[in-house]
Image (spheres, rainbow, N blue to C red):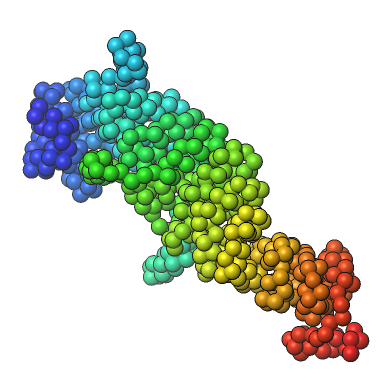
Amino acid sequence: SALSLLLQVDRELGNAVVQEGGLHLFLDLMKRSEEPGVLRAATEAVSHLATSKDKQATMIDLGGIGALKRVFKNGDKVGKLTACMTASKLLQQDPTLLSSLRIYERLKEATLEAVQSMKQSSKSGSDKQEGGVDVASHLPFLRMLCEGLAFLAVYQPARQSFVEDKEMLISIGEIAELSGEEGADPVVQYGSVTCLANTLRCDERHLSEQEEQLHRLQLTAQGGNTDVEGEMEALRQRIRDAIENANNRRMEFAQNGGVKSLVKLASSKSTGVRYRVSEALFSLSEVVNARGLLVRDGAMRALISLSLEPEPEGEDAKKEEQFQRQFEHYNLPSSSSPLEREEAPKGIAGIRHLAAHALAKIGVTTNPALYPQSTATELVVPLVRLCRGQDFALARYEAALTLANISSGSDEVREKLYREGGWRAMEFMASSENDKLVEAAAGVLCNLSLCDDVLERMVEDEKDERQMLKLFRVLAMHDSDEVSRASVSALANLASIEPLSKRMVTDGTINRLREVVQSTDEEKILHPALFALKSLAEFSSEGAQAVADEAFVPLLFLQGSDRVTEQVKKLAAELAEMLPVPNSIPDDILEEHADELATLGLG
């Protein structure tokens, strides 16, 4: 009885006592005791010991399965639940236990019973105090139940049973919600939400180039008649199937109302619970078809709150650290996308990261018109934070895409984005060697250039103004058409603003636009480039002459090209007609196109 109480009250100290007693002692008690209390405590002790694969294998070798069956027969209600939790840990060693010991069925019966008891307790307590759920009276039962559920969901084949069972999903969510009211027990809430988070996990990810090479080398080393390419394709297909199965499981969870339970738990006082909620919502956000359900069921508001988590202080921080240490043994590795190599950080930083990444994933494919304006504005801070730094390339890429999406039609979002350091974050991202990151950053920078208030702040400082124009000039000739299009579009917008157009006539922008015109046949790039040149030519006679000297001949070439559209030819002709006679022709054009120039009769 003392040991059982100790394991409930101080798990660290209780675990130390259990380690001193050893596996043989407690298994022997499970096999021969007739006392339900002894069976319960001994089974809980064995469960604490069976945390490593070595100990699990030893337990099976020492007749542990027979001992568990005896507890199922002779133990009390909590003892049987403890046996279920212990058996869940052994599934990796012996998968047949799931059916032979009816682990899922036993846990479901206990779950439904727990929900019913908690609801009755809530009703009977409502006359005494408003909204009270007497968790304490059910505590040993609830703790064992929720730990058992968490461990069972670690076993991948059992996860499908959870998501296909709508009644079970709703009941687990209800336990977490009811235990989250006044007098909540963190073990109960954490165990139940961990079950939901583990159910949604995907343990597979696409192979990196280095991992593929390693597998090839291993297969090649086997020699004989090994079909290396055939084996590699079979491996890739297994991974694709596993990811597809995980996504189907997540979709069923969302369709069965699981999102609403997670949203309610997002306001839990426990950092551990909020971390698991962030992890679960992130897993759901990886499924494109589930994102609409996340928006519909209120996940955006919950994720924004989680992404802005403050750091715990003082006693709260100490309690949370102690709590996390107690339950590390049934934590899975942190969530990460099947495409991501890095794992998410832990603690408060992990909550922020997972929640912000989930927001980014949802925002990439969601029409910003579907958000309230306030929601779009609130997305800015967590997404800008996510974009900073050098790790988690996929998270940064998706965050920047969402920032581009929500800033595409809202000056309010653009102003907020600039105030929160969005310009600097995108400027840094645009210097990356990863073309995808540069593309996403260029889209955000282009949108910011459309906001009058942002530009007013930029031109207040001459250094900032010069740096902005230089950045767009450099990106205009990027190898990526998307980066080039966004940057040239930004230059086209800036060229129509008088304080900036004056500088652009003399700072090399016209030369860069001419290089763009010469280097591409893409209308989506040529159109804004020609518009920018036209704006600079209309600004002043000096601008018109500068455009003529740099771009007159390329404009003539465009009109005779068979690789551009009629619309581009028309724009080139209109611009050429409004220009004065060039005073000179750039040397590189003279060298590369001497024969063509001779036919034009330019002298």
- Depth check: give the residue in front, 213 or 418: 418
Q: Position of residue 82 (x, y in %)?
A: 22, 30
Residue 488 in view, yes or no? no
Q: Position of residue 27 (x, y in %)?
A: 13, 36
- Depth check: give the residue in front, 485 or 455: 455
- The structure residue drawn at horizontal position 64% and vertical position 41%, both measured from the top left corner, is 369
Residue 357 in view, yes or no? yes
Q: Quadrant of residue 134?
A: top left
- The structure residue drawn at horizontal position 35% and vertical position 18%, both measured from the top left corner, is 131
- Depth check: give the residue in front, 352 or 329: 352
Q: Is residue 247 above or below residue 435?
A: above
Query: On the rendered image, what quadrant is the N terminus found in?
Result: top left
Total marks placed: 0
- The structure residue drawn at horizontal position 84% and vertical position 89%, both measured from the top left corner, is 595
Q: Is residue 439 left or right of residue 150?
A: right
Q: Is residue 306 left or right of residue 95?
A: right
- Depth check: give the residue in front, 488 or 226: 488
Q: Residue furthest front?
A: 460
- The structure residue drawn at horizontal position 28% and vertical position 33%, both measured from the top left corner, is 186
Q: Is residue 286 left or right of residue 111?
A: right
Q: Is residue 218 above or below residue 386?
A: below
Q: Is residue 578 above or below residue 288?
A: below
Query: On the rendered image, what quadrant is the C terminus found in?
Result: bottom right
Q: Is residue 474 left or right of residue 156?
A: right
Q: Position of residue 235 (x, y in %)?
A: 46, 57
Q: Quadrant of residue 128?
A: top left
Q: Position of residue 297 (x, y in %)?
A: 52, 32
